[in-house]
Image: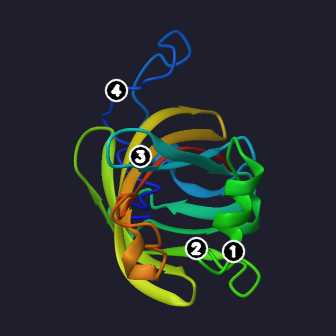
Amino acid sequence: MRYATLALAGLTLGQILLPQAVFSKTPELSQAAGTYNITGTSQIRFWVDQVGGGSINGRFTKFSGRFRIDGRSIGASSISFTLYPQSVATAEGRMEDFLRSSAVFHADAYPTVTFRSTAVRQTGDDTAVVDGMLTARGITHREQFSVRLQGLKGNAIAFNVTGNVYRSRYRMDVGTPIYLNVVKFDMDIRGVRQ
C-alpha cells in the first residue's frame, strides 16, 4: 500500500507496452482524458517476504475504484480506490482466515481499505507517481505508488501499479521480524471510460 499509484499519468508521449500492432502511435493526453471505472479484470496482488526465503503471496478478488485523467494537466488527475479485505485469497484457507482476523486486517470491524490521491506527478513518457492517503484498520497514512501505462485503446486503458507499504503503520506487523514489515504490491489496473 506504499506506492498506491494508479498512475493516472504518463499518458503523453509514452511507449505502449501492449502489442504494437494495436497502437499505431502514442496516445495524446487529450485522447485519454476522462473518468474511468476500474474493472473486475484488474489484478491486485501482494506478498510479504520471509527471513530465510519464501513469502506469503495473495491477492484481493473484490475491489472498486474510479480515476479521472485531466486532459490538460496530469497533476490535476485523481484516483479513489477501495479494496475489501474479506476477499483476500491465498493458496491456503488457514492463511486467508488469519489475514482476515483481528491480528491483520480485522476485516469484520474494518471491512474496507481505501486510497484517495492527493497528488499525481508524471515521471516519464509513460510513468507517474501517485501520492495519497491510505486508510486501513481506521488508521490513515500518506503512501506513494508508481504507475506505468500499459495501453490505451478506445475507451479502455491499462496500467501497472507497484508500491510498498509498511505493515507496522497500520498495526498489522504480527510475525515480524520473521515476516518482513513491508507489503509489496503489484497491480494490473484496467479501466473503462464512463
SS for tag 4? loop
**Which numbered disc covers residue 29?**
3
Which residue occupies 64% across, 34% down?
Answer: 154
Indicate the amino acid at tag 3: Leu
Which residue, given by chain and number where applicable, does mark 4 sit on?
A: 15
Indicate the amino acid at tag 2: Val
Distance of label 1 from label 2 (alpha carbons): 6 Å
Q: Residues within 10 Å of mark 2 (few under 14, many from 20)?
A: some
Which residue, given by chain and number where applicable, does mark 2 sit on?
A: 104
Indicate the amino acid at tag 1: Ser
Q: Is residue 129 left or right of residue 49?
A: left
Q: Residues within 10 Å of mark 3 (few under 14, many from 20)?
A: some
Q: Nearer the viewer, residue 100 or 185?
A: 100
SS for tag 3? helix
Which residue, given by chain and number where applicable, does mark 1 sit on?
A: 101
Circle 1/circle 2 CB separation < 8 Å: yes
Circle 3/circle 4 CB separation < 8 Å: no
Which residue occupies 40% across, 58% down?
Answer: 179
Q: Where is residue 107, by image quadrant?
A: bottom right
Report the colour scheme: rainbow
Distance of label 4 from label 2 (alpha carbons): 39 Å
- The numbered mark, 1 or 4, whose residue comes first in the sequence reads 4
The mark lying in front, picked from 3 and 1, is 1
Distance of label 1 from label 4 (alpha carbons): 42 Å
Q: Is residue 51 left or right of residue 44?
A: left
